[in-house]
Amino acid sequence: MLKKVKKAIIPVAGFGTRFLPATKAQPKEMIPLVDKPVIQYIVEEAVKSGIEDIIFVTGRGKRAIEDHFDFSYELEQSLFEKGKKDLLESVRKIAQLARFAYVRQPQPLGDGHAVLCARHLTNGEPVAVLFGDDIVDHSKPCLKQLIEVFEEYQSPVLALARVAKKDVSRFGVVRPETLKERTFLVKEVVEKPSPEKAPSNLIVVGKYIITPEIFEILEESPNQSGEIRLADAFSEFLKRGNALYGYEFEGTRHDCGDKLGFLKATVEYGLKHKDIGREFKKYLKNRF
């Protein structure tokens, strides 16, 4: 029987230190990209990919995320009374995007630990894992592309992107074996290699499909510093003779965890915005 991916884990417990002081009192994930917080783009990607249940792994100071995906009676009533139907609809539909659940990561013990905190809500099913920094702009959601690969191979899938060789030392890098266009069998995952030692220029982006076997490995394998890392779990998964796949997704990736990447994304999404895109384009032409 083919297994379907209907749940997604979204870890949002980090401090957002790269965006201080803006993130001192608000979650990084709630910083708006034009008129929607970054985290809403991630949730919408999941929903458009067929995800029905969203599990947020939160930490201290993340209440705003819960409030954003909840109903706001006072706001909705105010918009209704003022006849602002379009705004009312855009606000109301946020809470209806999916079924939302929240668990706490009590200590910052690594990305694998954050994912592990949600294990009890997965019911032994394959799940998507989406980190809040990477937004991919394409007509077919990036996660949907990964799910299609999973449905073919029924084994974990990593989202892959190509970068310049000089930049590989900032990322996890795979040693790929080509199966077909854009689809690879991952033979090795190397964390932040030097350009000279990198097995390729295909990096791992923060979007995955994982299976119960990955959770079992995460449960067993904290590293020497006590952290539990997804990259270590994928490496151990390979050592045990399992098949791990990678897919070089189609679309433009915006790294919204980086200040420059966030500004580029703001420009691109601003130009595409139905209300302000035309005037914003005029402004940019006149400014530069």
Image (cartoon, rainbow, N blue to C red):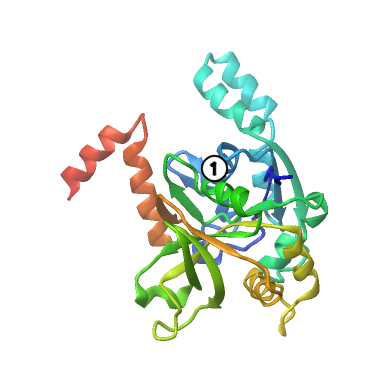
Q: Nearer the viewer, residue 165 or 56?
A: 165
Give coordinates of residue 40: x percent, y percent.
Answer: 56, 42
The answer to whether one can see residue 26 in this image is no
Give coordinates of residue 80: x percent, y percent.
Answer: 59, 16
When the figure is inspected, residue 173 is found, relative to residue 161, above or below; the finding is: below
Q: Estimate how packed mark 1 is, as few (under 14), some (14 to 19) or many (20 or more) residues with alpha carbons within 10 Å.
A: many
Residue picked out by circle 1: 45
The answer to whether one can see residue 207 in this image is yes
Please name the amino acid that badge 1 sits on. Answer: Glu
The quadrant of the rendering that contains the N terminus is top right
Dot 1: element: helix
Does residue 236 appear left or right of residue 137 in this picture? right
Snapshot quadrant of residue 238: bottom right
Does residue 87 appear left or right of residue 234 in this picture? left
Give coordinates of residue 189: x percent, y percent.
Answer: 56, 74
Q: Nearer the viewer, residue 140 or 8?
A: 140
When the figure is inspected, residue 95 is found, relative to residue 165, above or below; the finding is: above
When the figure is inspected, residue 178 is found, relative to residue 84, above or below; the finding is: below
Residue shown at the point (35%, 41%) measured from the top left: 270
Snapshot quadrant of residue 2: top right
Give coordinates of residue 285: x percent, y percent.
Answer: 18, 44
Does residue 165 appear left or right of residue 287 in this picture? right
When the figure is inspected, residue 247 is found, relative to residue 280, above or below; the finding is: below
Q: Nearer the viewer, residue 168 or 23?
A: 168
